[in-house]
Each structure stands twice: as C-alpha cells, then as structure tokens.
Amino acid sequence: MFGLETDIFILLSLCLFAACAFEFVNGFHDTANAVATVIYTNSLKPNVAVVWSGICNFVGVLLGGIGVAMGIVNLLPVELLVDQNVYHSIAMVLALLLSAIIWNLGTWYFGLPSSSSHTLIGSILGVGLAFSTMASAKTGGGVNWEEASKIGKALLLSPLIGFSLAIILMYLLRKLVNNKALFKEPKKNTPPPAWIRGVLIATCTGVSFFHGSNDGQKGVGLIMLILIGITPAHFALNNNIDPTTMRGNITQISTVVNRIDTVGLSSADRVRLGQTKAELVNLQMLLNHPLEDNTFKREDRLQIRRDLLLINNNVKKLIESEEVNLSTADIDTLTANLNEKKGLRRFTDYAPFWVILMIALSLGLGTMVGWKRIVVTIGEKIGKQHLTYAQGASAELVAATTIALATFYKAPVSTTHMLSSGIAGSMVASRGIKNLQGGTVRNIALAWIMTLPVSIMLSFTLYIFFRWLL
C-alpha cells in the first residue's frame, strides 16, 4: 500500500483501525442522545430506533461536508503535521487515538453521557502540548491556539445554549399548544398520538443526521491526520487538482500583498508580511519544478503544504489587523484566493470519498450497539419525572437545530451535552430546579469538566512514551 515498508504499513493499518474503533465507540456512546426520547415515549421500539438512527448517522456523515474535519486537522501546528520522521507521526496518532478511546469506553461503562468531541479535542491538545516541550517545536508551536479557542467556545457554550433554549421552547409550547396529553407521562407500552409520534421521530431523525454530519467529520479529521502524518507524499495535498491552477491564486495574492505599506505596521505584522512574501516566492519556485503525472513531485508536497498553510494563516491575520491598510476589494481578492472552493485551501482542505465512507460505516454500525447504558441515564436519571412528549420533543429539536447550525459554521459541538442539557432544561421548565436528580446532574457535570484535562494528560503522557518507544 503506497509503497510503504512492512512495519510502517502495519502501523498505518493499526492507526486506521483505531480511528474507526474510536468512531464506532462514538456511535454507541452517543446513540442514546438521539434514541432516548423516542424509546421512552414509546414512539419507536428500541431496535427499530437504533437501526434508524444508525442509517441517519451514516447519511449525515456522507452529506455533512468536511469543514469541521479541517478544524480538527488545523488544531495541530504545521511543523508537527509535516514532520519528516514517520515514526513521530505514528506516535502522535496512537497517543491521541488511544487516549480518546480509553476515556470514551470508561464513561460509557459507567453510563455517563460524556462528550466524544471534548475527548478527541483534549487528546489532540495533549499531543500538541507534549510536542511543544520538544526541541523540534517552535516557540508556541505546540497548538494552534486561535483555532483551539474557537472550538473551546463552541464546546463550552453549547450545553448552556441547549439548557436555555429547551426552557424557552417548553414555555412556548405551554402557552401555544392546548393539548394536555403533550405534557403528560406516556402510558406504558402505548404509542403516543400520531402527530406527536411524528414530531418525536422527526426530531430523532434530525439529531441522528446532524450528529453524523458533525461528529462524523471529527472521525474524518482523525483519518486525515493519520494519512497526512504517515503517508504525506500521497495525502499532504489533493492530487486530483491540476497544480498549475494554483498560479493564478498566487499571482493575485502576491499583487495585493506587495502593495501593503509597511509604514505604521507593528513588528508582528511586519514579520507576517515578510514571511508571506517569502512563502509566496518559495511556492512559485516549487511550481516551476517539473510535474510528475500532472501532480507535484512527492518530495515537494510536504513543503508545498507547509507554504500553503503558512500563507493562509499569515494573510488571515494581516486582513484582521487594523494596522494593515487594505481596501474592501483587496480583502475580497485575498479571501477568494484563500478559500476551500477556488482558493489555495482547496489543495489542503479535502478528504477522499473512501475516508468519508469508512467513517460513515463505523459510526453507523456503532450506533446500532451498546446504546442501553446511556439511554437509561438520559431517559430516567436526569429528571425526577418520566420524560414527557413535550420534554422529549423540545430537547431533541433544540439539539438538532443547534448541531445543524454548528455544522454550517464549521464548529464542532457536543451532541451529548446538547441533548442532556436540553432534557435538563425541559425538566426545569416543568417543575423547577428541584425536578432534577442532583446525583446524575453532578456526575454529568463532573464528566464535562474532567474530560478535557484527563484526555489532555492521557495523550500528553502517551505521546511522550511513544516518541521514546518509536
């Protein structure tokens, strides 16, 4: 495969298997978020619910795009992703995968609705921090903190949003819907009225689909980290695009960048501007090298990826700087020539279809098993009363809508925390804060707080160990 040595091929296969295993665990760990309400309201039989949820997750991955996936990839510094030592890349991948799987399985075993998103991102941050302690890292180069802060805000705010919106939605339902059956506990083994059942199944479908479109992309990002790190000659760039089309982007970016007046610029902006000009010149030189089968030479691809990522990062910061004098037309030109559709990022921000399909299958199949532990927690242990139709529909609708918006804006959020906080909000809206089971809420909150530091420490330690071992 890709002309790799036997030991590297075995390690690559192990890493790909571990990534699929993570997504499989993610499937049965997070399935409860989608199916708990339809099961506890008797809208669907458990086996039917999990199979339907699995299918929707599968479709969600296929149609979800790769914006969130690239956010995961871009958490790590450029120099870590273009490390010439393949064993360092293998150490990175094994550390973040094993730490994520260990925490996910542990919380699943104890029935805690912990976030796979928090776990994965914590694991990536741990690897980045461990890398920053090594001599090969540049100052502050262990983590892309700008990207990490954006993701962190999305993960931290999403439960608060879910909790608040569920309360508001329950209030509106009570005011606008004159149907007492909607707010009563379901009768045992009796399906709800047809229209209520339709709403609950629709919201379950929405959560499942958007869970696939958001969480599935994290798996795609994982696979791309593996492929870029271990087989960069094949996956550092999208080799299906004609490299010569890059020249137009470089020319237009260079024209704007060379017009920037350095007078009045901060020292940081001067450095960025100088680096950008140097990277553009270097990229143009590499483009002048002879092509192989209408693609870049293998030995040039890592350098080209590095140049593209640095140009993208530096130009974005120059655009955002108040000291850089750019017209609206100049900003539009730079933005258009950087984006993932027709700009430079189309060469770096991509995922082969077979990667997306592999993750879709892993998540879809994982969704169909192991769901019962966390379903019980969500359905019975968050609130002191049985889940009503209105509570189930409110929590699911809030979760589906918020996850859909997060995916649109390329932000990874926690499906687990969105739904469990939504159910908590719906319980509070019914009978106040006393309607929550304190023990369960404390455990969920503790898992929410502990996931990031634990996964960071696990992956930090494992990365140091694997670097020493390999």
Image: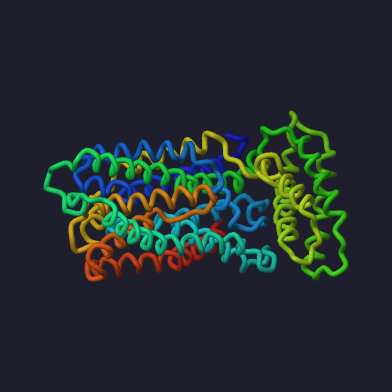
Q: Which residue lies furthest to the left in this view?
A: 188
Image-quadrant location for residue 272: bottom right
Color encoding of the figure: rainbow
Q: Position of residue 227 (x, y in %)?
A: 58, 44
Q: Which residue is drawn at 75% across and 60% down?
A: 318
With respect to residue 457, does 79 lie above or below? above
Q: Name the one closer to the observer, 275 or 288.
A: 275
Quadrant for the N terminus, please. Answer: top right
Question: Which quarter of the rendered picture does the C terminus lie within?
Answer: bottom right
In the rendered image, residue 277, in percent from the top left (x then y), is placed at 83, 54
Quick check: 198 left or right of 278? left
Of the pair 291 and 174, the residue shown nearer to us: 174
Left or right position of 331 against 147: right
Residue at image coords 84%, 49%: 254
Please provide percent x and percent y for residue 332. 74, 49
353, above or below 107, in the image? above
Q: How many numbered discs?
A: 0
Q: Is residue 281 visible?
A: no
Give the residue drawn at x 83%, y 51%. 256
Does any portion of residue 186 appear in the rendered image?
yes
Viewer-proximal residue among 381 and 309: 381
